[in-house]
Image (cartoon, helix red, strand yellow):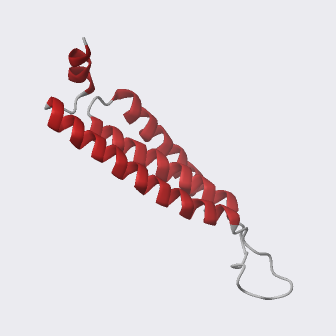
């Protein structure tokens, strides 16, 4: 199970980085950023996974518990990621209204 999740996290990281490096459309860049964020969150939660462990809310004497801190960090990162996504999309809307395009190559021509 851990190997499948680790492979998925690695694949999502590769897809996100490839998209960030090759896409020239700003909305696609935001989507690639979200894919990369999902990969990081999956890796963080995977770090906390322990086979045969219980949730820390269960009060049983001799069982191993899952470490809850990575889960709390993941929830916090989800909220921050949603806020960043909303902010990036708001900036893209402003850029589109003022320049008429969301392609980075065309925006570079405006700068000259």
Task: Evaluate whether residue 2 shows in this view.
Answer: no
Q: Residue at x 48, y 53 (%)?
A: 38
Q: Which quadrant of the structure image shows residue 62?
A: bottom right
Vertical position of residue 51 compared to residue 104: above or below: below
Instruction: Please state which of residues 54 and 101 is positioned toward the viewer in this rendering.
Output: 101
Quadrant (top left/top right/bottom left/bottom right) for the C terminus? top left
- Residue placed most toward the observer, 2 or 108: 108
Identify the residue at the far top of this view: 112
Give the quadrant of the N terminus: bottom right
Question: How many numbered circles does the render carry?
Answer: 0
Q: Is residue 6 left or right of residue 107?
A: right
Q: Is residue 9 left or right of residue 112?
A: right
Above-or-below relation of 48 to 59: above
In percent of width and height, residue 108 lies at: 26, 18
Q: Tell me where residue 91 sits by quadrant.
A: top left
Q: Residue furthest right?
A: 62
- In this view, the residue in front, 92 or 42, is 92
User: What is the x, y in percent for residue 52?
Assistant: 73, 75
Determine whether 3 is above or below 22 in the image.
below
User: Furthest residue to the left?
Assistant: 100
Q: Please give left or right for residue 21 compared with residue 112 in the image.
A: right
The residue sitting at 69% across, 79% down in the picture is 55
Asked whether residue 7 is in view, the answer is: yes
Which residue is rendered at x = 17% and y = 33% of the image? 98
Q: Position of residue 33 (x, y in %)?
A: 41, 43
Residue 19 image offset from top left, x and y in percent: 37, 35
């Amino acid at each position: 199970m851990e190997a499948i999740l680790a492979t998925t996290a690695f694949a999502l990281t590769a897809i996100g980085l490839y998209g960030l490096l090759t896409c020239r459309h700003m909305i696609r860049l935001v989507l690639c950023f979200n894919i990369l964020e999902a990969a990081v969150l999956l890796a963080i939660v995977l770090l906390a996974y322990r086979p045969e462990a219980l949730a820390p809310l269960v009060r049983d004497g001799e069982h191993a518990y899952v470490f809850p801190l990575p889960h709390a960090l993941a929830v916090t990162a989800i909220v921050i990621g949603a806020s960043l996504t909303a902010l990036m999309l708001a900036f893209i809307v402003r850029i589109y209204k003022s320049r008429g395009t969301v392609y980075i190559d065309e925006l570079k021509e405006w700068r000259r």
